Image (cartoon, rainbow, N blue to C red):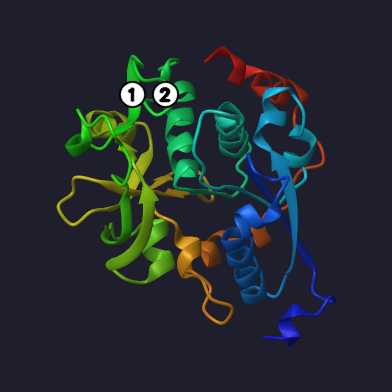
Amino acid sequence: MIDKMQPAAPSVRIAVVGKYVELHDAYMSVKEALLHAAMLVERQLEIEWLHSSDLEKDRGFEILETVNGVVVPGGFGERGVEGKILAARFAREHKIPYLGLCLGMQVMCIEFARNVLAVEDAHSTEFELHADHPVIHLMPDQHGINNLGGTMRLGLYPCSLKPGTVAAQAYQRTHVEERHRHRFEFNNAYRERFSSAGMVFSGVSPDDLLVEIAEISDHPFMLGSQFHPEFQSRPNRPHPLFASFMKASAAYSPSVEVEAASTAEIKGVGNGH
């Protein structure tokens, strides 16, 4: 393991697009999970810390143009969410490996609804309570609860994997258990519409009621998990989703000439919702 950490290894550059990037320790588990995965593929990890709010101000796209992969971690509150949606769109349109963690999966779904399904006002009720198209919403058994303290889906929950998917290939298993820390879920009312457009719900709860993993079928690696896989990563046992993401990132070569028109089209979109 120490040999794999030596500086002689080629580097892999990963953009972590978050809202707390001023304090890197806020994403310590994510940073360490990326390091574990980078050691597995014998690469030196270089993290580009990108504030999601900067993307909302048309800054930081030049970083996304040069990285090997994009990670959008979890978070709470509306600040910087539109920037995370912009990062998801950029990764999807430019085929950059993308890993979304909790909120990172949710913004991936919101972006997909807005720009693939053409549901321009798609959102999460966490940020827009009366959204016309709440593709992410409060868990059904929590409707009507005024005091949300202590109502998270918190801790270890089972997940069934769909055979033949990126997620199933990463885990090499059909059932796993993962740690959660969230309150909002994918809205099943949109599941069929998303599926028909190319999103695969590759991980679900055993009763098929809750989406746990979503991935995009026509993308080299674009996957989001409702849970936090970083919590179970270890130096000598990288988490399977991080390992799979890092392998895809190591194989990806960022283009030095991303089409200016395409980038310009993405810039500024977040301020419209």
Q: Which residue is mark 1?
A: 134
Q: Position of residue 127 (x, y in %)?
A: 44, 25
Residue, x 17% and y 38% (percent of image)?
141
Q: Could you tell me which residue is drawn at 65 percent across and 43 percent down?
A: 20
In this rendering, the answer to whether 179 lies above or below 269 is below
> Quick one: 60 or 243, which is closer to the camera?
60
In this rendering, would 104 be left or right of 96? left
Q: Secondary structure at mark 2?
A: strand
> Mark 2: few, some, or many residues within 10 Å (few <14, many ≥20)?
many
Residue at position x 32%, y 71% from top?
173
Which amino acid type corresponds to the residue marked 2 in the rendered image?
His
The answer to which image quadrant residue 131 occupies is top left
Is 251 placed above or below 1 here? above
Q: Please, which residue is most extreme toward the right here?
A: 8
Left or right, 16 with reference to 106: right
Secondary element under disc 1, as helix, strand or loop, is strand
Q: Which one is earlier in the sequence, the residue at label 2 or at label 1?
A: 2
Marker disc for residue 123: 2
The three-letter amino acid code for the residue at tag 1 is Pro
Vertical order, 182 against 138 (above or below):
below
